[in-house]
Image (cartoon, grey):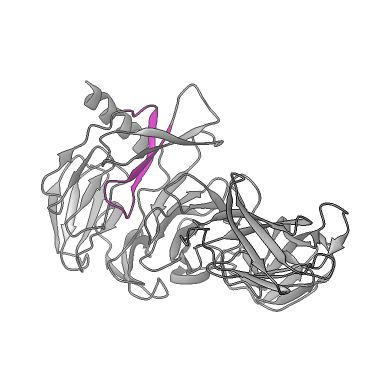
């Protein structure tokens, strides 16, 4: 009875789902398959250069989802009738064979050769010929989305309750969906369009919320979530997101159609820095393209991802004077760029991806307006830049402690100013739970932390606090 009820539920959810895996990673870096637009409808595309160029291998399948195996050239598709087809020749037309039935929206795989998951209810180790059922004890609510982790047996499910409109629940399993437990609650409405995809490393998971145009990321098996980026996608549909094979690689696929198919465009947004900045590829174009302003930024001296905690606005921060590199990835054939770096109505730059120096402290909202000769579009990111000085928590005077890079990966440089300097400088490092993880003592003005604790073990990524000679406290972020 449990299986029958759940099967009916999945059929209903399939009609609500905004994306049934419109894009999938191949077994090699830069290799992707996706469902994109054609001159008359849609087809399956194949790319080996991150989506910069792609060929339509088949426009006759009526596929609602695609999934690449870890075996080169092996690809699956699912149709509206829940049938699973397989090709061993890169999805070329005429190479498909019916493999199985009853495949629900949101199938997963690609960790091992021949592995495919029918959402979370079963999995196959023989290229979808037979499926092994799971118990999924602890499941509750209504199914939205699922994903498997790079680490074997780890998996995730998003659900909602019919009587709770403003919560979406993330369930996690560590035993291949035999047992589930509630791991996180998101303050999202039940009908918001959400997709999960894993990253290239164990424990990495992306969440893309189409309705809020936001990309979230977790590096610790969905325990902590970070708002990586926000977008201006307008009326795009056919959205899809997938993590790639290399470090920090993530793709967003989106389609645009209007005027009774007179205008039809497919875009691939590619990132190699965990979704902070993107390149825009345009593998299919028909008619007039849309115009949408999109951008992000990073401090010039920081190569790592700038992140903030879940449910806060993504922002870039650093000490004054702060040099910021802006990344333009607007969609459409823009010919003119107008940057307003403090949203005061004055144009500060016409460059495509400029660098700007902030010399005063405070919050800054950024506006980019793009033009293509016929149209214009603007995108404002409120409170996107924060320029600060470290503050002495005892005297409340501004001091010029230099801490860089922040975030950091394996080495943090700390230059202690005169007002804080003592004969024997001491920096005490605490984690986000207030636990002392390391104390550094050095008779010099500059101190370096290698990211290790007092037992010479690597500290996990996360937020840490530095207490400098008991006179100043600084907040820093350790990344991957």
Confirm whether the magenta stretch covers residue 154: yes
Residue 205: % across, % down: 43, 52
Q: Which residue is drawn at 53% across and 27% down?
A: 165
Question: Which of the 4 quarters of the picture holds residue 333?
Answer: bottom right
Horizontal and vertical percent for residue 353? Answer: 65, 76
Q: In this view, does 207 lie above or below 406?
A: above
- Looking at the picture, tell me which residue is in the foreground, 276 or 181: 181
Count numbered badges in the picture.
0
Was residue 252 drawn as part of the magenta stretch in this picture? no
Is residue 321 shown left or right of residue 107?
Answer: right
x, y percent for residue 391: 81, 58
Residue 230 at least partly seen = no
Residue pictured at 51% horizontal, 57% vertical? 461
Q: Quadrant of residue 334?
A: bottom right
Q: Nearer the viewer, residue 71 or 337?
A: 71
| Residue that appears at 63% across and 70% down | 405
Q: What stretch is highlighted in magenta?
A: 138-159
């Amino acid at each position: 009875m449990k299986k029958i009820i759940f099967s009916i539920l999945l059929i209903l959810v399939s009609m609500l789902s905004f994306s049934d895996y419109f894009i999938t990673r191949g077994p090699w870096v830069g290799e992707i398959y996706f469902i994109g637009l054609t001159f008359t409808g849609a087809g399956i595309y194949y790319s080996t250069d991150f989506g910069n160029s792609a060929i339509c291998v088949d426009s006759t399948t009526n596929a609602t989802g695609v999934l690449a195996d870890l075996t080169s050239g092996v690809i699956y598709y699912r149709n509206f009738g829940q049938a699973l087809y397989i090709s061993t020749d890169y999805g070329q037309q005429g190479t498909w064979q019916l493999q199985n039935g009853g495949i629900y929206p949101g199938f997963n795989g690609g960790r091992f050769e021949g592995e495919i998951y029918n959402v979370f209810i079963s999995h196959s180790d023989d290229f979808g010929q037979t499926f092994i059922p799971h118990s999924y004890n602890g499941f509750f609510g209504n199914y939205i989305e699922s994903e498997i982790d790079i680490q074997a047996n780890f998996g995730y499910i998003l659900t909602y309750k019919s009587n709770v409109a403003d919560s979406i629940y993330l369930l996690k399993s560590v035993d291949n969906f035999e047992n589930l437990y509630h791991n996180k609650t998101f303050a999202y409405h039940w009908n918001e369009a959400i997709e999960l995809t894993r990253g290239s490393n164990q424990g990495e998971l992306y969440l893309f919320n189409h309705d809020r145009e936001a990309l979230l990321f977790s590096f610790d098996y969905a325990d902590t979530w970070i708002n990586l980026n926000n977008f201006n996608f307008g009326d795009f549909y056919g959205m899809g997101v997938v993590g790639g094979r290399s470090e920090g690689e993530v793709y967003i696929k989106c389609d645009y159609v209007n005027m009774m198919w007179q205008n039809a465009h497919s875009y691939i947004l590619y990132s190699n820095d965990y979704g902070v900045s993107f390149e825009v590829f345009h593998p299919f174009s028909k008619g007039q393209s849309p115009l949408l302003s999109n951008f992000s930024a990073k401090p010039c001296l920081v190569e790592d991802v700038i992140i903030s905690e879940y449910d806060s606005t993504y922002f870039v921060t650093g000490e004054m004077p702060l040099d910021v590199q802006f990344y333009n990835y607007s969609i459409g054939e823009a010919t003119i760029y107008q940057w307003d770096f403090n949203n005061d109505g004055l144009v500060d730059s016409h460059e495509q991806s400029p660098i700007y120096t902030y010399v005063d402290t405070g919050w800054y909202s950024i506006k980019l307006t793009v033009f293509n000769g016929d149209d214009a579009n603007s995108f404002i990111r409120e409170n996107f830049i924060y320029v600060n000085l470290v503050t002495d928590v005892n005297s409340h005077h501004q001091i010029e402690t230099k801490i860089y890079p922040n975030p950091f990966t394996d080495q943090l440089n700390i230059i202690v100013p005169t007002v804080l300097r003592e004969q024997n400088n001491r920096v005490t490092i605490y984690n986000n739970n207030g636990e002392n993880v390391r104390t550094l003592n050095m008779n010099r003005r500059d101190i370096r932390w290698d990211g290790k604790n007092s037992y010479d073990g690597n500290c996990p990524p996360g937020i840490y606090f530095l207490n400098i000679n008991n006179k100043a406290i600084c907040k820093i972020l350790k990344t991957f």
